[in-house]
Image (cartoon, rainbow, N blue to C red):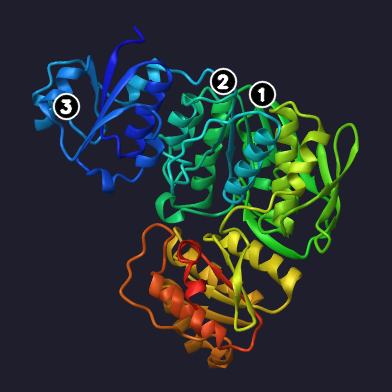
Amino acid sequence: MNKKTFGVIGVCGANGNLIARILKQRGYNVIGTDLSFKKDCRFVKSLEGYDIEVFYGKTPDSFFKKVDCVVRPLSLSKDSEILKKCDKPILDLYDIIDMIKPEKPVFGITGTNGKTTTTTLLKKIAYDNGIKPCEHDLEGMQGNAEFIPILQSRLDGDVGILEVGTFGKPGTIGRIVKNTDMTAGLITNITPDHLNDLGSFMDYANVKAEFIKEIGEGKLIVNANDPTIIGLLRELDFKGELITFGINEIPDSMGMKECVCGREIAVKEIISGCGYYFCKCGITTPQVDYIATNVDLVNRTFDLFTPTEKLTVKMGIDGLHNVYNLTGVIIAAHEFLDLPYDKILPSIADFNGVSGRMEEVGKVKGKDIYVDYAHNPAGVETVLKEFKKLFGEFTTVITVSSESGYIGDIDIFNSVLKFSKFIVPASVASQKIAVEKLRENPKLNDRIFLNHVDDFVKTGTLGASEEEVRDGLIKALNLDCEMIIAIGEAATKFKSVVFEL
């Protein structure tokens, strides 16, 4: 059976690439084909070392003669011209998912903010302790939605540590959890995002709730300072093992959040959307299993009280939001990877963060320039609040176009206005709001500096072009402020323009 030869069509696509590698790792012979030429094949590097013959730029008749069955991409109809010359059995992605199982423990990480940092750090701890997570190795791909996590879980590795996202699509999270045999996971937070796709905040929250439903009687680690998570756990009557964590910190703002019961609930916020809360329906901040306290952001330390002992945690990254991220990771490493705390804490201390997350890119004209991927209202508010605590005054260059549309864009702009000394709107969305703000209040002319915007059309959260990011930074460099932070996907994607300046 292991000598069977699979022909995989579309190996330059993410799914085709992963399927080819999975089959090869399981001992099958694999031949690939793609209409792209090798120089245009985005993921060609990840096929290196796999001994997979690939026909680039064509699908010759010899391809069909060499294989025992063909795996077609979902985008290719069985009635397509290319498959009319195939007299072999034709499979698709779902057949591969049914045929090959993960055969390893799988842990998932979901939430609105903090997923990538948490996933990256948990993998680092695994590697540091000789545990190999399966990796999709698709260069430039975050890989947190659609079929990538499902296929990634089937690649070689001791464990699966998967980032689980939605991109605003109901059913995505449930499909990932179910098809990876996931039995444990972590929820970082649930704050408004993707509202253009899903309508209301609770519609979005219920998409995240698929994670809870499909984990079933497995193990969940959750941020109990988030009333949405606690409310969903109650509504769904979660029967599995629940581990809760939070931070003992004095709230510095008051926010409102929709409760699962439909009421507006006041939250004494530690970070955006998370803190202390009580609703008439009975949802309130619970006593937690793990509590972080004595947080010292200047010296990057905090104490963590576990069910059995007190830990002193040294952080390699900044921000109160990262105290939440690190606490969740410590619990996951202890509970899922079964590691003692003394094997976890050294990795926490020397973790310097993920590229594009509160990342210091360089110094230009004596001004420090940072970028951050924050692209939804809660993420922007949290990051800028932490910047204010750590650095004082700063200029914000906005490259965001919110996936929640105008409502999200206006919330983001208001947060920028609240925390920043100067604002440079570099995206079309932020420019439009800036014009509205200046019309309403001309006194903001000394804080908001309009920037050149080209005809760039946003894609997802990519709200600005490379030229807009460059022009925005140039304008920010000429303002009387020593710190600059550029926020949004475009800021991180085009951060290399800093070196041109």
- The CA distance from mark 3 to mark 2 is 33 Å
Tell me the quadrant of the picture where the N terminus can be found: top left
Q: Position of residue 400 (x, y in %)?
A: 47, 66
Mark found first going from the N terminus, 1 or 3: 3
At 51% from the left edge and 70% from the top edge, which residue is drawn? 410
SS at badge 3: loop
Is 429 or 365 nearer to us in this picture? Answer: 365
Q: Position of residue 74 (x, y in %)?
A: 27, 32
SS at badge 1: loop
User: Which of the 4 image quarters holds residue 417?
Assistant: bottom right
Above or below: residue 433 compared with residue 241? below
Above or below: residue 501 compared with residue 168? below
Mark found first going from the N terminus, 3 or 2: 3
- Residue underneath mark 2: 104
At 30% from the left edge and 39% from the top edge, which residue is drawn? 12
Instruction: Name the amino acid type tagged 2.
Output: Lys
Above or below: residue 114 compared with residue 98? below
User: Which of the 4 image quarters holds residue 347?
Assistant: top right
Q: Is residue 168 left or right of residue 33?
A: right
Above or below: residue 67 compared with residue 171? above
Q: Residues within 10 Å of mark 2 (few under 14, many from 20)?
A: some
Is 258 or 448 nearer to us in this picture? Answer: 448
- The CA distance from mark 1 to mark 3 is 43 Å
The numbered mark at residue 78 is: 3
- Residue underneath mark 1: 239
